[in-house]
Image: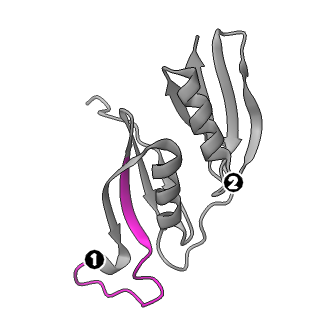
Amino acid sequence: MAIKQLNPYLNFGGNAAQAIAFYEKALGAKTETSQTFGDVPGMPAAAENKDRIMHALLKLGAGTIMISDGPPGLPSPTDSNVHVTLDFEDAGEMQQRFDALSAGGTVTMPLQDTFWGARFGMLKDKFNISWMFNCQK
């Protein structure tokens, strides 16, 4: 059996809806589906949890990112050794998206020319998600 697709799944602790709105604006992501814990039939959610995102699917270019707040009461990860990598065709668009996504976050490596013939940079966004940006020259 071949793997059909690889999709990063980003977990948040109650602010997934804000992250989705931020990724739509900063990266041009398109939300295809989004369900809250309050949307689940036969599973009543406490008032404070009904608007938490149970599952969302965002399209980002040809790729897919999934997002969730995770089950209420469980802590979300605060750090990881994983980066979501975005590969661009246009360096100007990459710069624009890099600047937008880094707002409120931390640039860990500014966009710069590399020895492998690309423009590359890294950042951690305001939701503590690590990203890599790459554009072959």
Q: Disc 2, disc 1: CB below 8 Å?
A: no
Q: Is the magenta stretch mostly helix, strand or loop?
A: loop
Does residue 85 show up? yes
Determine whether, in the image, residue 50 is placed left or right of residue 136.
Answer: left
Crowding at label 1, few (<14), some or many (≥20) Cα neighbours within 10 Å? few
Task: Return the x and y of residue 73 as percentages of the image width and height.
Answer: 55, 80
- The residue closer to the viewer here, 96 or 62, is 96
Question: Label 1 belongs to which residue?
Answer: 40
- Which amino acid lies under the numbered mark 1 shown in the image of this protein? Val
- The residue closer to the viewer here, 68 or 60, is 60
Does residue 1 sit above or below 32 in this rendering?
above
Question: Label 2 belongs to which residue?
Answer: 79
- The residue closer to the viewer here, 71 or 14, is 14
Q: In which quarter of the image is the C terminus?
A: top right
Q: In which quarter of the image is the N terminus?
A: top left
- Based on the picture, tell me whether residue 122 belongs to the magenta stretch: no
Task: Return the x and y of residue 9 as percentages of the image width and height.
Answer: 46, 51
Does residue 15 sit above or below 114 in this rendering?
below
Residue drawn at (63%, 14%) of the image: 118
Tell me the quarter of the picture where residue 60 sits.
top left
Colour mode of the rendering: one colour
Tell me the quarter of the picture where residue 115 sits.
top right
Kindly state the secondary structure of the residue where label 2 is placed: loop
Does residue 130 show up? no
Does residue 67 sit above or below 64 in this rendering?
below
Q: How far apart are marks 2 and 1 (CA)?
A: 29 Å
- The residue closer to the viewer here, 118 or 85, is 118
First in sequence, mark 2 or 1: give its number. Answer: 1
Magenta residue span:
40-58
Determine whether, in the image, residue 89 is placed left or right of residue 64.
Answer: right
- Which amino acid lies under the numbered mark 2 shown in the image of this protein? Asp
Residue drawn at (66%, 24%) of the image: 120
